[in-house]
Image (cartoon, grey):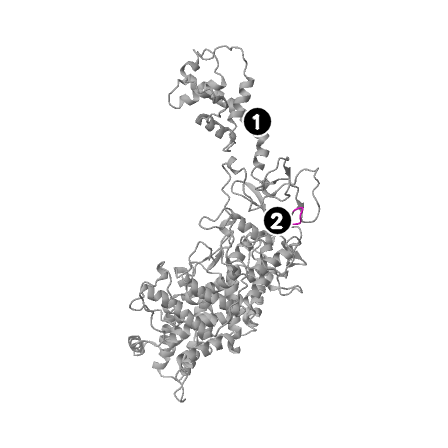
C-alpha cells in the first residue's frame, strides 16, 4: 500500500514552491552540524535526491509497497504535523533525514565561502564576479595576489567581498544588501554621529567671576522654585574654611589658618571691615595662586589627576608606566598653570621615556603606558573616551550599546587612531613610540583595524571620531592616509578641541567640589543619559573654553558658587534634595561625604607636625603609597578597575585607630599639634577649644566642654593623658572623617 493514497494532492503548480522544513530534520541538522545555522537548501537537496533515485520499483521496505518519492515523502511530513504516523514511518523518515543532512553538509561546505561573503559589502553589486580584497600591510609591502591570503587574528572569518567599483573592506556605514539571507547577523544600525563631538566655531566672550556666580545661582533657583524648596542656610566661616582647604589643597586647615581667616572677616580696628564674600574670595585666591600653598596645591591636584588617569595602582605593578614620572609631569603642568586642553593633547600624543632618569624622559607617556597590555590599546581607547570625552564606549567593544545609539563600530574606529602605538625597552628604559607595523594599510593608503562582530565575522574599520571621519573635522594635521604618528596626533587634536572636553571637565570638577555631578557618573555623559542642569553645564563649559581651559578659574567659580557656601544641614523644605538616596541633585545644600584616603593621610600628616616642602614631596609620596596600599587593590578587568576598601568598614577603622600614622598624629612632640597645645601657656578652656578647632573646625558645645572639664577634676589621670585621649577620640570620630 502506498503512502500517496492517504495524502492530499497539492495544487497543480506546487512543484516549484519550496516546502517548509520539518522540525525533525531541523533537530538532526542542529545536532550533526554542531549548533550551526545552515542556509535553507531544502529545494536543492530534494532536487539532487530526485535525480539520484532509481526509476524502477524497489523491493518493498518495512511493509510498504514502494519507497516514497521525494515529493510524497515531503507531503507525508506535512501531514504528520496533524496526524500521528506509526513507528515504522518515523524510522523511515529518520533514515531519510540523515541522508538529507549528509547531503546538506556537502553542499553547505562548498557554498559557505560564497554565502558568507554575501555579508561583506553594502555597495551596489555589479554583474561582474566579486574579487577577494588583498590588503597591503602597513610596512609597505604589497601582498602577492598569487599567494594565499594572510591569516587574520583569532582565525576569524573576514567579510572582504567587494565590487568592481570599490577596493576597500566593509566599513561601518555599509548596508547589508544580502543580510536577509543570514539570520545570525545582528542588525546594522543607522550611522550615528555624536552631535557635540565637533569643534564649535562659535566663540563665547569671557565674563567676570561675579557674572558667572550670578548665572549659577539663577539656574539653580529655577529648579528650587520648580520643586518648591528653599536652600539651606549659609555655612559659618569655620565650616566653609575647612571644606575649601580640603577641596583645593587636600587637607584640613590648621588652627592658625582658621583664626587668621576669622580675623580677616572682622578687623575691628578698621573703619571699613572686609565683608564675608570679599574675605572668602581672598582666601580662595591665596590657596590657588599664593606661593605659600603652591607645593601643596600642585601635589594635591597631581595626585587627583593621576588617580583619575591610571587609578591608584597604575604605574606601580602590572604595567610599564612610571607613576612618579606621570606625577612629576602633572606637578610641573599645574605649577605653570598649563591649560587643560594642552595637557590632554600631550597625554594622548606623547612619545619618549617613562623614567625621569632617561634623557628621553617625557612624563606624559605614562598615561598611555599604564593603559597598554602588550600593545593592546583597548584600555587606552576606553580611558580616552570616558575621562576626556565623557563617553563610556567600553561596553561597545564587544557589542552595540544596549541603551544608546553607540555602536560597536564607534569604539573600534576610535581605537584605530592608536593602531601604530608601541611600548618597547631600550637600554633598560621603557619607551613609548609610534611604529608603522600597527593596523592594516589598504591599497588606497588608509590604515584600519579589524574587530570581531558578535556573529564571529571580522570587520575592518577606519579612524573616526565618535562617528565623524577625519575629513569632517577641522584639523591642522595631514591626511589620515599616512603614518600612525599623524593618526595619534589627530586623535589628540580632535579630543582637545571637542566641546565634550569642557563638558566632561566641568562635570568632573563640579562633582569633586560638591559631591555629585550633573550626571550619575562623571565618566558617562552619553546621549542616553539626562543632565540634571543642562543650561548650567553649558554656561560653565562655554566659559571654560573662553578662559582657555584655565583650571584655576573653573575651580574658583565653583568654590565661590552658592551651593558650595551652603550648610550641609537640611532646611525646612529641602529634604527631597537627597542624591545619596538616588534622587536628582538640586544643590540646595552642601552634600557631606567621606574624605578620600589621600585627604585623610595628608590631614593626619599635617596634624602630626610634618612639614611639606618641594624637597620632601618624593619621600612623602612613597610613604603615602605604602599607606594607601592597605585599602586599594587592582582588579583583573579590561577597564582597569580597582577595589577600594576605604569606605568606613572595620578594616579602615582598625588601620586608622591603631596604625602608625595615628600614633604619629597623637604623639606629644614639640612639632605635633597636640604637643604644641599641651605645652602652651593657654588655660585649659582654650586648649580644649584648640583641639576641637584643629580636628573638626568648630568649638566644643557647652555640654562637651562640661564633660571634658570634669575629667580634669580626677587626680588619678594626668592632664597630658586627658588631652591625648580627647585628641585621639576626635581624630577617630565620624566628624573628622567627613567633609561637611
Q: Is residue 417 magenta?
A: no
Q: Position of residue 628 (x, y in %)?
A: 48, 63
Picture coordinates of residue 280, whole percent (x, y): 43, 77
Q: Is residue 128 above or below residue 637?
A: above
Number of numbered discs visible in the structure rendering: 2
Is residue 397 or residue 610 the one in the foreground?
397
Q: Quadrant of the N terminus?
A: top left
Residue 448, disc = 2
For the C terminus, the quadrant is bottom left
**Above or below: residue 34 compared with residue 380:** above
Q: Nearer the viewer, residue 1 or 592?
A: 1
Q: Earlier in the sequence, mark 1 or mark 2?
A: 1
Q: Position of residue 205 (x, y in %)?
A: 51, 70
Residue 417 appearing in the image: yes
Q: With 568 as the anchor, is 453 left or right in this view?
A: right
- Give the image location of residue 407, x and y in percent: 50, 48
Give above or below for 129 relative to 223. Answer: above
Is residue 691 something one can see in this rendering? no
- Stretch of the chain drawn in magenta: 442-448
Which disc number belongs to residue 106? 1
* Residue at image point 55% right, 27% down: 105
Residue at x-position 58% and y-position 31% = 111
Q: CA distance from mark 1 to mark 2?
A: 36 Å
> Tag 2's secondary structure?
strand
Amino acid at each position: 500500500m502506498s503512502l500517496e493514497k492517504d495524502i492530499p494532492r497539492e495544487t497543480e503548480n506546487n512543484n516549484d514552491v519550496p516546502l517548509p522544513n520539518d522540525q525533525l530534520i531541523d533537530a538532526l541538522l542542529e545536532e550533526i552540524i554542531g549548533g550551526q545555522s545552515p542556509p535553507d537548501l531544502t529545494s536543492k537537496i530534494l532536487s539532487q535526491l530526485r535525480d539520484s533515485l532509481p526509476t524502477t520499483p524497489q523491493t518493498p521496505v518495512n511493509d510498504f509497497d514502494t519507497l516514497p518519492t521525494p515529493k510524497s515523502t515531503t507531503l507525508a511530513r506535512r501531514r504528520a504535523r496533524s496526524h500521528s504516523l506509526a513507528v515504522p514511518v518515523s524510522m523511515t523518515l529518520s533514515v531519510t533525514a540523515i541522508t538529507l543532512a549528509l547531503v546538506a553538509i556537502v553542499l553547505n561546505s562548498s557554498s559557505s565561502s560564497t554565502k558568507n561573503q554575501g555579508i561583506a559589502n553594502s555597495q551596489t553589486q555589479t554583474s561582474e564576479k566579486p574579487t577577494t580584497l588583498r590588503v597591503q600591510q602597513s610596512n609597505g609591502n604589497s601582498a602577492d595576489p598569487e599567494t594565499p591570503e594572510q591569516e587574520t587574528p583569532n582565525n576569524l572569518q573576514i567579510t572582504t567581498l567587494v565590487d568592481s567599483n570599490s577596493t576597500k573592506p566593509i566599513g561601518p556605514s555599509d548596508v547589508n544588501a544580502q543580510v536577509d539571507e543570514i539570520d545570525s547577523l545582528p542588525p546594522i544600525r543607522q550611522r550615528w554621529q555624536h552631535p557635540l563631538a565637533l569643534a564649535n566655531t562659535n566663540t563665547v566672550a569671557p565674563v567676570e567671576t561675579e557674572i558667572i556666580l550670578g548665572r549659577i545661582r539663577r539656574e539653580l533657583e529655577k529648579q528650587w522654585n520648580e520643586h518648591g524648596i528653599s536652600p539651606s542656610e549659609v555655612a559659618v566661616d569655620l565650616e566653609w574654611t575647612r571644606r575649601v582647604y580640603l577641596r583645593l589643597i587636600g587637607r584640613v586647615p590648621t588652627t592658625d589658618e582658621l583664626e587668621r581667616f576669622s580675623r580677616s572677616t572682622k578687623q575691628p580696628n578698621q573703619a571699613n571691615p572686609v565683608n564675608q564674600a570679599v574675605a572668602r574670595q581672598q582666601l580662595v585666591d591665596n590657596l590657588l595662586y599664593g606661593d605659600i600653598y603652591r607645593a601643596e596645591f600642585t601635589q594635591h591636584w597631581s595626585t587627583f589627576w593621576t588617580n583619575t588617569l591610571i587609578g591608584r595602582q597604575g604605574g606601580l605593578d602590572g604595567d610599564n608606566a612610571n607613576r612618579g614620572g606621570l606625577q612629576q609631569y602633572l606637578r610641573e603642568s599645574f605649577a605653570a598653570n598649563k591649560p587643560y586642553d594642552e595637557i590632554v593633547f600631550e597625554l594622548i600624543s606623547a612619545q619618549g621615556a617613562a623614567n625621569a632618569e632617561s634623557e628621553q624622559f617625557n612624563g606624559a607617556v605614562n598615561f598611555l603606558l599604564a593603559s597598554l597590555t602588550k600593545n593592546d590599546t583597548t584600555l587606552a581607547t576606553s580611558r580616552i573616551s570616558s575621562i576626556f570625552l565623557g563617553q563610556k564606549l567600553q561596553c561597545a567593544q564587544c557589542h552595540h550599546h544596549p541603551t544608546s545609539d553607540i555602536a560597536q563600530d564607534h569604539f573600534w574606529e576610535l581605537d584605530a587612531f592608536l593602531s601604530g602605538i608601541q611600548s618597547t625597552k631600550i637600554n633598560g628604559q621603557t619607551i613609548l613610540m609610534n611604529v608603522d607595523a600597527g593596523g592594516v594599510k589598504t591599497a588606497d593608503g588608509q590604515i584600519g583595524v579589524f574587530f570581531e562582530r558578535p556573529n564571529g565575522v571580522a570587520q575592518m574599520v577606519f579612524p573616526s571620531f565618535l562617528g565623524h571621519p577625519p575629513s569632517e573635522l577641522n584639523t591642522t594635521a595631514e591626511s589620515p592616509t599616512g603614518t600612525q604618528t599623524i593618526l595619534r596626533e589627530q586623535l589628540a587634536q580632535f579630543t582637545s578641541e571637542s566641546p565634550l572636553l569642557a563638558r566632561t571637565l566641568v562635570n568632573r570638577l563640579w562633582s569633586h567640589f560638591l559631591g555629585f555631578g550633573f550626571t550619575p557618573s562623571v565618566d558617562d555623559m552619553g546621549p542616553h543619559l539626562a543632565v540634571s542642569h543642562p543650561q548650567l553645564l553649558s554656561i560653565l563649559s562655554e566659559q571654560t573654553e573662553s578662559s582657555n581651559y584655565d583650571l584655576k578659574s573653573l575651580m574658583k567659580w565653583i568654590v565661590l558658587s552658592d551651593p558650595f557656601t551652603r550648610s550641609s544641614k537640611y532646611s525646612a523644605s529641602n529634604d527631597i534634595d537627597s542624591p545619596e538616596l538616588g534622587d536628582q541633585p538640586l544643590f540646595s545644600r552642601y552634600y557631606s561625604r567621606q574624605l578620600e584616603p589621600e585627604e585623610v593621610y595628608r590631614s593626619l600628616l599635617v596634624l602630626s607636625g610634618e612639614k611639606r616642602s618641594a624637597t620632601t614631596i618624593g619621600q612623602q609620596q612613597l610613604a603615602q603609597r605604602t599607606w594607601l596600599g592597605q585599602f586599594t587593590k587592582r582588579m583583573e578587568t579590561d577597564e582597569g578597575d580597582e577595589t577600594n576598601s576605604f569606605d568606613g568598614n572595620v578594616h579602615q577603622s582598625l588601620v586608622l585607630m591603631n596604625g602608625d600614622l595615628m600614633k604619629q598624629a597623637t604623639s606629644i612632640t614639640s612639632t605635633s599639634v597636640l604637643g604644641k597645645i599641651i605645652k602652651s601657656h593657654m588655660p585649659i578652656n582654650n586648649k580644649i577649644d584648640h583641639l576641637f578647632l584643629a580636628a573638626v573646625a568648630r568649638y566644643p558645645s557647652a555640654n562637651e566642654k562640661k564633660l571634658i572639664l570634669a575629667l580634669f577634676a580626677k587626680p588619678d589621670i594626668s592632664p597630658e593623658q586627658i588631652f591625648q585621649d580627647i585628641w585621639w577620640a576626635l581624630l577617630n570620630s565620624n566628624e573628622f572623617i567627613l567633609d561637611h
